[in-house]
Image: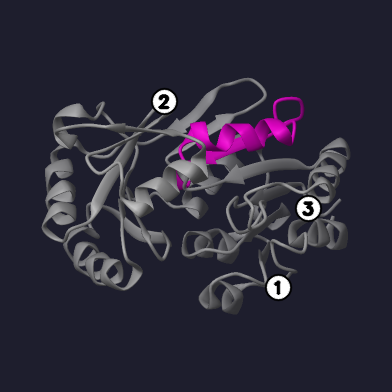
Amino acid sequence: MKYKLLVLDLDGTLTNSKKKITDRTRNTLIEAQKRGVKIVLASGRPTYGVAPLANALELNRYEGYILSYNGGEIIDWKTGELMYKKWLENDILPYLYKCAKENGFAIVTYDHEFVLTESPDDEYVLKEALLNVMKIKKVDNFLEAIPRPITKCLIVGEPKRLEILEKEMYGQLKDKMGVFRSEPYFLELVPKGIDKAQSLSVLLKEIELAKEEMIAIGDGFNDLSMIQYAGLGIAMANAQPIVRENADFITLSNDEDGVAYAVEKFI
């Protein structure tokens, strides 16, 4: 078997537009695991938001892994072992908060099942909570309320304006931390050196596999690094143009069981 590790983004990839895993995709992935393929769910979501999908695919039964917070955390889902974790520097948090507030954007972070924010009614905060099946917890003072250390913050807002802020913040912070969008309306703020490819390199070393034995499938900006890194990088038909341009293969869309189609073709 040429490919032994299958890495899947969640939103826009594993799940359809209704945020569900179809029966065909689920059955195909469980069959792949029965044949010895290890599955990694790699997402910008917090671990709490990835867990239900990991359990639906029975990663706790087979040798599966969760790579959450865009790679800030890696968990062996069968044993529960935390294999890797990286934190944001505490002294950078006030600057992140200032950037969001001065530009009229909401900023969030996470605490177990809660999305913490000063802006519980913001449409993009609501979208993030719905996406992760998490509750929104309103805080009066974000910097005082957040648990420290934290793995990630997220600034959310209107895509065109957020793109401008992304460029400004990247220019200021590129030597200190990661600043990139996972969706046009989600600006990810993560520890330096954290992206899906970097964290996958850590996991590959731990489980003694080569990147040439890995397939990565995704659709978003934050999937680009792992698609370029993998032995076989696959973009969804609904992927961002730059992701499709850099993929080895373009599968069907997430509403056409594109993951199942790719697995059936290559594994």
- On residue 7, the disc is none
**Residue that mark 1 sits on:** 250
Q: Nearer the viewer, residue 95 or 74?
A: 95
Point out residue 78 in the picture as x, y percentages from the top left corner: 67, 24
Q: Marks 3 and 1, Cα distance to the nearest angstrom?
A: 17 Å
Q: For the residue carrying disc 2, how many other residues have a C-alpha within 10 Å: few (<14), some (14-19), or many (20+)?
A: few
**Residue that mark 2 sits on:** 112
Judged from the image, the secondary structure of the residue bearing numbered disc 3 is loop
- Residue 167 lies, with reference to residue 139, above or below; the image says below
Judged from the image, the secondary structure of the residue bearing numbered disc 1 is strand
Judged from the image, the secondary structure of the residue bearing numbered disc 2 is loop
Point out residue 16 in the picture as x, y percentages from the top left corner: 67, 56
Q: Amino acid at mark 3?
A: Tyr
Residue at point 86%, 63% (across, down): 265
What is the quadrant of the C terminus in the image?
A: bottom right
| Image quadrant where residue 53 sits | top right
**Residue that mark 3 sits on:** 3
Point out residue 70 in the picture as x, y percentages from the top left corner: 46, 48
Q: Nearer the viewer, mark 2 or mark 3?
A: 2
